[in-house]
Image: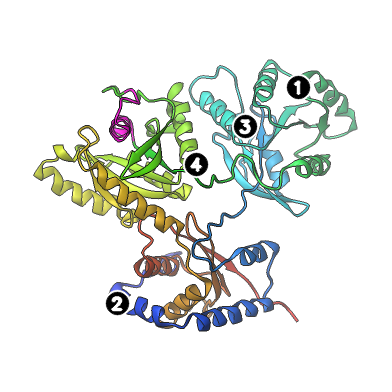
Amino acid sequence: MATDQPNTPDFDDEQLETDDELASRLGELDDDLVTQRAAALRAGLEDYDLDEEDLEVLDAATDDPDAIIYLPALPVLAIVGRPNVGKSALVNRILGRREAVVEDTPGVTRDRVSYRAEWNNRFFTLVDTGGWEPDAKGINASVAAQAEVAIDLADAVLFVVDANVGATSTDEHVVRLLRKAGKPVYLAANKVDDVRQEPGASALWSLGLGEPYPVSALHGRGVADLLDLVVGKLPLESAVAKNEVGGPRRVAILGRPNVGKSSLLNKAAGEERVVVNELAGTTRDPVDEQVELGGKVWRFVDTAGIRRRVHLAQGADFYASLRTSAALEKAEVAVVLLDVSAPISEQDVRIIDLVLESGRALVLAFNKWDLLEDERRRYLEREIEQDLAHVSWAPRVNISARTGRHLEKLVPALETALDSWDTRIPTGKFNAFLAELTAAHPHPVRGGKQPRILFGTQASSRPPTFVVFTTGFLDPGYRRYITRRLREVYGFEGTPITLNMRVREKRKR
């Protein structure tokens, strides 16, 4: 049967030489020679159309194996306002493309959605939020919570009001929230499509946020002037999204409710630091705790259990879920706790996927191991094989948080995952690795063309992020092949690997 998807094989191991042979050959290569070859490949890129972002990535590359390089944290601009004032239409206007869902129905946007935006050669992150309603129940409470989190995690806020409706009691409620946050706020009076509607914008001085800027997200009127002002005052690097450096390594303890997270933290800390209750969901706030384990000091964060569906959670559970995400943002490695007495659930997999999306290092801790019976053990191995195959690279530790059994095994697992997370491969070695791979297994020909890899570099660590410049799109199967071989040759146990592709054409003479 015909399919729209190209055949993207994962290149079975039987077709390949052993990992030891490849690693041995790469180890024998002369360092000066591979550096010279990489420099020649880099010079060859001058014949291709590269943009400013390409050049930034290439300039940031370093061969220092101990260098910890983060790509700069872009400043964050959050767009907030009550439902149906045109926030998503304004997002699309700023981005210059239709990204956010726009409908006349209020409340179409549910979650915080981030986009990379550019204005006057300045890049920034634009966060679109759902409409904010005070004292909202159910799904509206989720939208309100998302907006509050967006404000907390933004460098500046663009507050959108419908100039034709004027300031409502909800708008005034938002103003109080914005004042409390203490962030720079710009007031956009939307739906001012022509001069006749400008008096409606002027009336918004009453909100006390300074000058209202009349704009029309629909027609673009006034948007450029507003962006000139806002983007010009954004910091070059985000003050809220930048990565912490130094101090004890930061560990987030994640898991679904009542899986034993608080018991684990209490055992590690050697005291009753966190309330432990049989009732699921006792923990509401992330709790930071300095813990000495294995002769080292760690900063553990115990987080509220993640409910299955964030947008259906009520009241405090909502905020708990959002705080969990915020805790993960500040962590370096996540320990995902799984209860071996119950089958691996969708919730467990979703939490693991949340860690992968965040780019944090990962350790899987199988809790209540002391209660595991032989029959359940057989089923568990099958579940791990089926449901956790995509994180087979994560270290596994079998523990009992209640008794403290095998808790010391967490330390080498954490150290392994963090070492991998920090790992950097020199540019010369990475290009030699790519040359060996493509020589052994060239990319399949697609549509009469065969994409070539021109050059590769590790753009950053934490997590290891690689960029390959190519003459055409690499199949997903081929990208998986490169990632898998990276793991087989260099380890990377306990860390996700990001492989970005930049397809570039030759510059026309």
Instruction: Residue type at mark 3: give it.
Output: Ile
Determine which quarter of the picture holds residue 343: top left
Whether pointer 4 and pointer 3 mark residues with C-beta atoms closer than 8 Å, the reply is: no
Task: For mark 4, give the secondary structure.
Answer: helix
The residue range painted magenta reads 256-275
> Dot 3 corresponds to which residue?
151
Instruction: Residue type at mark 4: give it.
Output: Glu
Task: For mark 3, give the secondary structure.
Answer: helix
Instruction: Residue type at mark 2: give it.
Output: Thr
> Dot 4 corresponds to which residue?
329
Distance CA(mark 4)–CA(mark 1): 38 Å
Instruction: Residue type at mark 1: give it.
Output: Val
Residue at x 40%, y 82% (from the top left corner): 28
> Dot 1 corresponds to which residue?
165
**Crowding at mark 3 (Cα within 10 Å: few <14, some 14-19, many 20+):** many
Q: In this rendering, which labeled residue sits more in front, label 1 or label 3?
A: 3
Establish if 30 lies above or below 455.
below
Taking the image as drawn, is residue 346 in sight? no
